Image (cartoon, coloured by chain):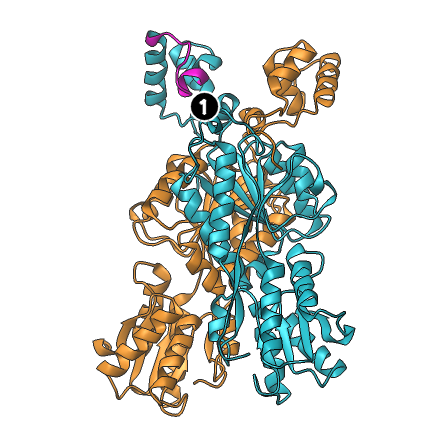
Chain colours: A orange, B cyan
C-alpha cells in the first residue's frame, strides 16, 4: 500500500512509554518474557495490543538473533537462472523443505561485481539466519563474506576456493559428476563410437571440471584437443560449441554435452548441418530435466535428482541452525547440544547419477 | 561456512563493554555519531575495529529504520515462475533498477496458504524497506498485510481487492491489456476470420479479465460461449483449452490466446489434430517473449514491454521510499518534502501494447 515510508508504524519506544517500562523490558517481554514479573509482562502486552505494535526484527533479533529466514544466493544473473530449468528445480526442493520448517526463503542473484558488496552487507546485517549458495565460480567472494559474518552456510556443488580445504570444512551437497560422465561416455563407447567429442560447462565451476575428468577417465587416453569445446552451460553456447567441433573434427561420431540445454543447442547445429542423430552423430546430455524429454530426438542423458539435491541442502542448513528442529534430523542423543557442523556430525552429501537411455544415443 | 549459529559474531554489547559506554551510545556512533562527543566516538570506533564488529541491522534499523532491501513477492509457486519467461523478464527490469539504486532484491514466492503468514511476518518485521508484488489473484491477503505493516508497496498489474478503490490509491504499473486484445482480434477480423475463439488466463486476475473484455469489444457482439476456454496462462492449459474449443466449435477459424505460452500449447493441439496454421486456423498470442519467436510458425502476437514494466515498478517504489534519491525522479521543488504516494505526485502507470505480425495470423 502507499503508506508513508517513515509513517505511523508504532515503535518499541512508544510501547515502553505507554507501559511505563524501559525499552529493554519491552524487548524481553516481546521475546518471551524471561526475567520479567508477570504483572509487568501484562502491562507491556496491553500496551502492545493497544498500539498494534508489530515486534520489529530490530528489537527481536537483538535478543533472539533469529529471523526465521534463509537466503538462497545463486551466483548467476537472473536471466541465466530463468532460462535453465536446473535452478527452478533445485529451488523447488529447497523451498519445500524450508516451508516445512516454517522458514522464509529469500532468493538473491549475482550479476555484477557491485552486487557482492550489497549482498554481503545484507547477509551480515542479521536479516537472515543462514544461507544456501550455489553455482559459485572459482574465486567467488561469497564464501569468505559468509565466513567473516559467521553466517551458517551450505553450498550446492563442491566449493573450490582458497579456504575450502581448511577446518571447519565447508558443508555442501553435490552429485557424482565424474561418475555420471563416465557412464555417458562408456555408453557411447559400447555403441561403437570412437570419435567422441565433449561440450563442457565453464571450467571455473567444479561440476564442469568433474564431468570433463569423467570423460577423460572413460576414454582411458588423453583426448584429442579438437574434440573439446566450452559451451558455458547455455543452449546458445552448446549450439556454437557444436559448430566449432564439427569444423575442427568433421569425423566425430558422438558428442557428450555436459548439460541438456547444451545438448539441445548441439542438436540444432547438427540438424542445420544435415547430420542425422543418432545415425551420424550420437548425442548424450546431462541433467534429465524437461529439455531432455522435449528434444528431437529425445535425449539419452545422465539423470541427477536436482530437486532432491535442493532438499538435502536445505535439510543440512536447518540441522546446522538447530539440530533438534530440522526435519529428518537423526535422534542421536548428543546431537541436541552439538554446535557447528563438525560437532553435529554433519558432512557433505554426494548423490548418485545414472544414465537414462532414450533415442539420441 | 560451517560456523556456529550462535557463534562468535561480536555483539553491540561487547563493543559497549570494551568502550566503557552504554549500548545506546554504541548504536548512535554506529549510525553516524550525532550527539556523541568526539572523544567518545573515537573510543567506540576503536572498540568496533578491535572486535571486528559488523553493525547489526537490529541495532542499525532501530535508529535509521532502513535496511537497503526490497522484497519482490510473486503470488505464484516457483515452478510456474520458472516456466514462464514473463516473470524472468519482469524481474530483470526490477533487478537492474534496484541495483542502480544499490538496493538489494529479495525474491519470495507464494505456493500454499501457509506461506502468506510467514511472508507477512517477514515483511512486517522490519527486514525490508518496501515491496513489489505481482501476479496477485483476487482476494489475495498480501495487500492487506502490507497495508497493516505500513509497508510501501507497488503492484504489478492493476490490483483488484476490496480495499483497492479506497484512498490512498494503490500504486501499480500495468499495460493496456484491453487495447492490446482489441488489436489482436481486429487483426483477425481484418484477415477475414469470422469464428474467432479466445483462450483466457485465470479470470481472478485483472490482466486476464481485461484481455477478455478487449476481445468482446473488438467483436462488437456477445461472443458464442463455445468459443471461450480458460488456459490458466500455462502451455499445458493452452493445449487443453484448444482441444476443448475444437470439440465444442469445430468450425472455428482463428484463436486469440491471451499469452504466448498458451498460444504455443494451442499450436501443439492444432498440429496434432491436423489443422494448418494459419491456413485453417489463425493464431495470435500475447506478450512477445522468446516462445513467440521460437513457435512454429512464428507467432503473431501483442507486444508488451515486460522488462520496462519491471523497471517502472522499481522506480515508483524507490521514489515512494525516497523522492530525492530515486533514479528518474523529477526535480519538482516540493517533491523533496513530500511523504507518501499522493503527496509525492506518484500515480499508476499504464504502458502501451502493440501488435507484432508474423506468420501465424
A142 and B152: which is toward the camera: B152
Nearer to us in this view, B191 or B54: B191
Quadrant housing residue B333? top left
Locate the N terminus of chain A by quadrant.
top right
* Quadrant of residue A122 within the rendered picture: top left
Q: Which residues are magenta?
A: B27-38
Magenta-span inclusion, residue B35: yes
Q: Position of residue A283 (x, y in %)?
A: 40, 82
In the displayed structure, A106 sits above or below A357; it is above
Query: Is A236 contained in the magenta span?
Result: no
Helix, strand, or loop for circle 1? Answer: loop
Total numbered badges shown on the rendered structure: 1
**Pointer 1 local density, CA inside 10 Å: few below 14, some 14–19, many at least 20:** some
Q: Tell me residue B150's x, y (percent).
A: 62, 31
| Identity of the residue drawn at 22% across and 81% down | A248
Q: Which residue is mark 1?
A: B11
Whether residue A220 appears in this view of the structure is no
Q: Residue at x 51, y 33 (%)?
A: B321
Q: Is residue A304 left or right of residue B32?
A: right
Furthest-bottom residue in this view: A279
Q: Is residue B32 above or below residue A72?
A: above
| Camera-nearest residue between A196 and B196 | B196
Vertical comparison of B266 with B73: above or below: below
Residue A100's spot in the image, x, y percent? 65, 49
From the viewer's perspective, tell me whether residue B241 is left or right of residue A355. right
Q: Is residue B257 visible?
A: yes
| Residue in front for this viewpoint, B79 or A300 | B79
Is residue A102 rendered to the left or right of residue B32? right
Q: Position of residue B18 (x, y in %)?
A: 39, 14
Amino acid at each position: 500500500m502507499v503508506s508513508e515510508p517513515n509513517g505511523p508504524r508504532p515503535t518499541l519506544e512508544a510501547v515502553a512509554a505507554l507501559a511505563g517500562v524501559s525499552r529493554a523490558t519491552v524487548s524481553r517481554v516481546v521475546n518471551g518474557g524471561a526475567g520479567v514479573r508477570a504483572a509487568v509482562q501484562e502491562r507491556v502486552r496491553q500496551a502492545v495490543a493497544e498500539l498494534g505494535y508489530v515486534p520489529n526484527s530490530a528489537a527481536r533479533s537483538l535478543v533472539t538473533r533469529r529471523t526465521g529466514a534463509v537466503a538462497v544466493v545463486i551466483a548467476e544473473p537472473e536471466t541465466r537462472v530463468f532460462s535453465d530449468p536446473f535452478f527452478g528445480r533445485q529451488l523447488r526442493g529447497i523451498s519445500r523443505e524450508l516451508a516445512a520448517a516454517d522458514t522464509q526463503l529469500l532468493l538473491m542473484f549475482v550479476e555484477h561485481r557491485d552486487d557482492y558488496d550489497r549482498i554481503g552487507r545484507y547477509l551480515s546485517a542479521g536479516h537472515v539466519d543462514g544461507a544456501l549458495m550455489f553455482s559459485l565460480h572459482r574465486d567467488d567472494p561469497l564464501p569468505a563474506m559468509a565466513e567473516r559474518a559467521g553466517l551458517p552456510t551450505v553450498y550446492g556443488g563442491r566449493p573450490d576456493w582458497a579456504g575450502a580445504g581448511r577446518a571447519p570444512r565447508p558443508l555442501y551437497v553435490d552429485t557424482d559428476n565424474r561418475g555420471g560422465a563416465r557412464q555417458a561416455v562408456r555408453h557411447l563407447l559400447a555403441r561403437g563410437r570412437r570419435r567422441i567429442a565433449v561440450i563442457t560447462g565453464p571450467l571455473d565451476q567444479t561440476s564442469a571440471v568433474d564431468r570433463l575428468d569423467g570423460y577423460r577417465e572413460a576414454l582411458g587416453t588423453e583426448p584429442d584437443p579438437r574434440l573439446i569445446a566450452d559451451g558455458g552451460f547455455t543452449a546458445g553456447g552448446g549450439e556454437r560449441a557444436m559448430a566449432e567441433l564439427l569444423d575442427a573434427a568433421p569425423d566425430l561420431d558422438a558428442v557428450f554435452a555436459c548439460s541438456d540445454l547444451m545438448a539441445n543447442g548441439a542438436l540444432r547445429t547438427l540438424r542445420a548441418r544435415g547430420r542425422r542423430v543418432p545415425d551420424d552423430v550420437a548425442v548424450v546430455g546431462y541433467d534429465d530435466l524437461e529439455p531432455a524429454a522435449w528434444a528431437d530426438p529425445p535425449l539419452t542423458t545422465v539423470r541427477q535428482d536436482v530437486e532432491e539435491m535442493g532438499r538435502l541442502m536445505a535439510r543440512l542448513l536447518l540441522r546446522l541452525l538447530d539440530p533438534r528442529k530440522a526435519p529428518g534430523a537423526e535422534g542421536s542423543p548428543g546431537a541436541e547440544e552439538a554446535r557447528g557442523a563438525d560437532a553435529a556430525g554433519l558432512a557433505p552429501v554426494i548423490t548418485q547419477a545414472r544414465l537414462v537411455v532414450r533415442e539420441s544415443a
